[in-house]
Structures are given as structure tokens and as C-alpha cells.
Image: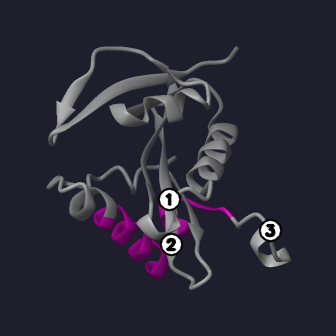
């Protein structure tokens, strides 16, 4: 493995006002590619929450300069945080990029944190300390479960 491959990728963190147009475009394109096209879920990804005060966008660029993994961290009225829109390009999966973003988001937010996890990823979220916290539901044909990360 070369030194370039061994180095940890840079994690970018920005509020809405700090985002440049290219990064915003890349983040929204990645989310659309993964959730709308790949998972065939027609839904309103642009939901007004990206621009909220306290919302932070986190992403990793690939070698070609395009966003290859991203997530959104929301402040839920100062009571807790919500991690969502966790997405990695199909070409960059299984490299630990989403894990790096999750660990950084958890460190930035601190508990309590909630996620609306796709049920097939429950164990992935559990590896970070999240536990199922309510009734499951199906949205766009995909089973989801609420999960929560608390201190201790």
C-alpha cells in the first residue's frame, strides 16, 4: 500500500453559509444518486433542513475531487442531534469512509444522537453504540428503525 492510499481522507465540515456551490452540488448529487436512483426512492431530499441554523454537512472528496461520502448532522432544538443522509458512492464503498464520517459526527455532536436507520444497516449503526429506540416502519419500500446513541 502506498503512502497516499494509507493516509486518512480529509473530512470537510461546513454549515449552510460555509458551503460553496460546487460542494453543495456534489453532496446533493451523491444523495440523489444513492437514494433516488440506486434505491429507487422518489422523495423530497431537499427538505429545508439543510439550511437550518446548526445543520452541519460533512463529506469526503475522492481523488478526482468529487464528493464520494457524505452525511448531514442536525441540531434538534438543542435537545439532541440527528445524523441522516449518510451516503457513499457505490464506487467507494467498503473503504470505511462512512465510518470515518460517523465517528467524526458523533464526536462533534455528543449524545444524545438519533438516526432513522434503514433496517438492513441496524448492525452497522449498532457498532457505533446506537440502539433501536422505537417501532419500525416502511418508507419507500425500505424498512427503517429509529435508533439512539446515549452517553454511557
Residue at which label 3 appears: 7
Q: Decide if residue 12 is on the left or right side of residue 77.
A: right
Point out which mark residue 101 bears: none
Horizontal and vertical percent position of residue 3: 85, 75
Contact (Cβ within 8 Å) of mark 1 with mark 2: yes
The quadrant of the picture occupied by the C terminus is top right
Horizontal and vertical percent position of residue 8: 76, 63
Q: Is residue 78 visible?
A: no
Lower position in the chain sequence, tag 2 or tag 3: 3
Q: Nearer the viewer, mark 1 or mark 3?
A: 3
Horizontal and vertical percent position of residue 61: 58, 73
Q: Is residue 108 magenta?
A: no
Residue at which label 2 appears: 67
Residue visible at 47% across and 62% down? 16
Residues under labels 2 and 3: Cα distance? 17 Å
Crowding at dot 2, Cα within 10 Å, few <14 / some 14-19 / many 20+, comes out as many
Point out which mark residue 70 bears: 1
Q: Nearer the viewer, mark 2 or mark 3?
A: 3
Lower position in the chain sequence, tag 1 or tag 3: 3
Report helix, strand or loop for mark 3.
loop
Report helix, strand or loop for mark 1.
strand
In this orientation, which residue lies closer to the viewer: 138 or 48?
138
Residue visible at 51% across and 60% down? 93
Report helix, strand or loop for mark 2.
strand
Residue visible at 18% across and 53% down? 41
Residues under labels 1 and 2: Cα distance? 7 Å
Give the residues in magenta. Answer: 11-33
* Residue 31, above or below 63: above
Amino acid at each position: 500500500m502506498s503512502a497516499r492510499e494509507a493516509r486518512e481522507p480529509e473530512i470537510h465540515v461546513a454549515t449552510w453559509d460555509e458551503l460553496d456551490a460546487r460542494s453543495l452540488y456534489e453532496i446533493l448529487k451523491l444523495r440523489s444518486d444513492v437514494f433516488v436512483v440506486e434505491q429507487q426512492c422518489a422523495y423530497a431530499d431537499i427538505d429545508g433542513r439543510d439550511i437550518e441554523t446548526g445543520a452541519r454537512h460533512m463529506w469526503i472528496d475522492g481523488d478526482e475531487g468529487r464528493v464520494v461520502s457524505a452525511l448531514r448532522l442536525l441540531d434538534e432544538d438543542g435537545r439532541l442531534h440527528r445524523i441522516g443522509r449518510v451516503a457513499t458512492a457505490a464506487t467507494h464503498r467498503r473503504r470505511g469512509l462512512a465510518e470515518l464520517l460517523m465517528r467524526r459526527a458523533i464526536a462533534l455532536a455528543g449524545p444524545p444522537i438519533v438516526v432513522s436507520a434503514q433496517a438492513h444497516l441496524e448492525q452497522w449503526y449498532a457498532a457505533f453504540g446506537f440502539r433501536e429506540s422505537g417501532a419500525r416502519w416502511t418508507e419507500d419500500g425500505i424498512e427503517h428503525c429509529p435508533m439512539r446513541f446515549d452517553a454511557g
